[in-house]
Image (cartoon, rainbow, N blue to C red):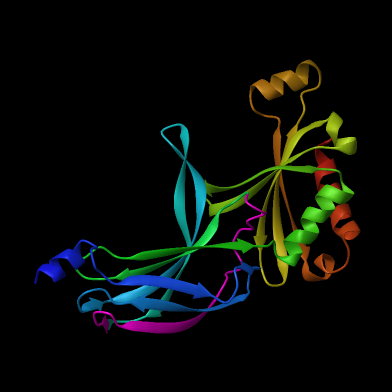
């Protein structure tokens, strides 16, 4: 009885360890692995085992920005089961990385799998496994066009909350080349689909002259644009993508 009481507060309770076949992925890729549950000192019932794909995002609360943990996807790995004291159970799984998952881009954005055991009337054991998500090839082509063809420099990447779109990954670029003289920055959000990418751009123009300063003071200097890049375009060349992006951005030169 005393051991059961201890287990309910996490002492001598079951433990969980998720083991992945690898830790680097791209959106849409399958993830294979197993969840290892190690029984504690007493028998325990587990209602379910779930794996969550997690990241951090910025949300504005009371006029200040705060970081919070965000679940990008929830996966059911197992239904109810019982784990005996000292017993080990291995539950293999195969899940898919969703297309809307953000890219980690090195260590700019932390992304991880979090596994939890739902144990009634007890602390739920958790396990955290960091992973690296590379940009989808379509997104990589767009980034290549912006940086290597049009001269933009990626300055910041973060997840932000949008009332319209939920949590989105926002890319902030510093202008280079010809754009340095009339842009302060360029922000981009990508909505990835199987056969196309919707690109939303926010063009922040540099103030020029009295009219420009007036517009900037009233925060009227930002212009929003969108374009859709097809699978055919995205699999052609960065130069093709660069031309489409340039046509869109150049509308705001004046």
Give the residue drawn at x 20%, y 79%.
43
Residue occupying the point 25% across, 69% down = 13
Residue 49, image x and y in percent?
A: 36, 75
- The reply to whether residue 233 is in sight is yes
Q: Where's residue 36, x and y in %?
A: 41, 78
Magenta range is: 82-107
> Residue at (59%, 68%) from the top-left corner?
23
Residue 234 location, quadrant: bottom right
Question: Does the magenta run of residues contain 42?
Answer: no
- The quarter of the rendered structure image containing the N terminus is bottom left
- Image spot of residue 162 (x, y percent): 53, 48
Say whether residue 96 is left or right of residue 40: right
Magenta segment: does it hold 88?
yes
Asked if one can make out residue 254 in the rendered structure from this viewpoint, the answer is no
> Is 218 above or below relative to 125?
above
Residue furthest to the left in view is: 1
Look at the picture and state if 174 lies above or below 244.
Answer: above
Relative vertical location of residue 232 with respect to residue 244 in this rendering, above or below: below
């Amino acid at each position: 009885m005393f051991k059961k009481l201890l287990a309910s507060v996490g002492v001598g309770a079951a433990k969980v360890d998720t083991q992945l076949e690898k830790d680097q992925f791209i959106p849409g890729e399958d993830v294979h692995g197993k969840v290892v549950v190690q029984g504690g000192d007493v028998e325990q019932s587990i209602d379910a085992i779930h794996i969550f794909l997690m990241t951090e995002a910025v949300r504005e609360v009371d006029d200040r920005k705060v970081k919070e943990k965000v679940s990008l996807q929830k996966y059911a790995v197992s239904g109810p089961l019982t784990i005996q004291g000292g017993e080990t159970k291995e539950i293999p799984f195969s899940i898919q990385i969703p297309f809307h998952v953000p890219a980690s881009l090195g260590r700019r954005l932390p992304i991880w799998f979090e596994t939890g055991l739902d144990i009634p009337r007890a602390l739920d054991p958790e396990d955290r496994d960091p992973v690296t998500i590379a940009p989808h090839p379509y997104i990589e082509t767009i980034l290549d066009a912006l940086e290597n063809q049009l001269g933009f420099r990626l300055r910041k990447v973060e997840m932000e909350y949008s009332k319209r779109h939920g949590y989105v990954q926002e890319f902030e670029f510093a202008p280079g080349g010809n754009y340095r003289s009339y842009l302060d920055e360029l922000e981009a959000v990508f909505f990835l689909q199987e056969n196309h990418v919707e690109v939303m751009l926010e063009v922040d123009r540099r103030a020029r002259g009295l009219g420009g300063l007036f517009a900037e003071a009233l925060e009227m200097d930002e212009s929003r644009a969108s374009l859709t890049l097809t699978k055919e375009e995205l699999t052609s060349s960065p130069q093709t993508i660069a031309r489409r992006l340039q046509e869109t951005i150049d509308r705001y030169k004046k």
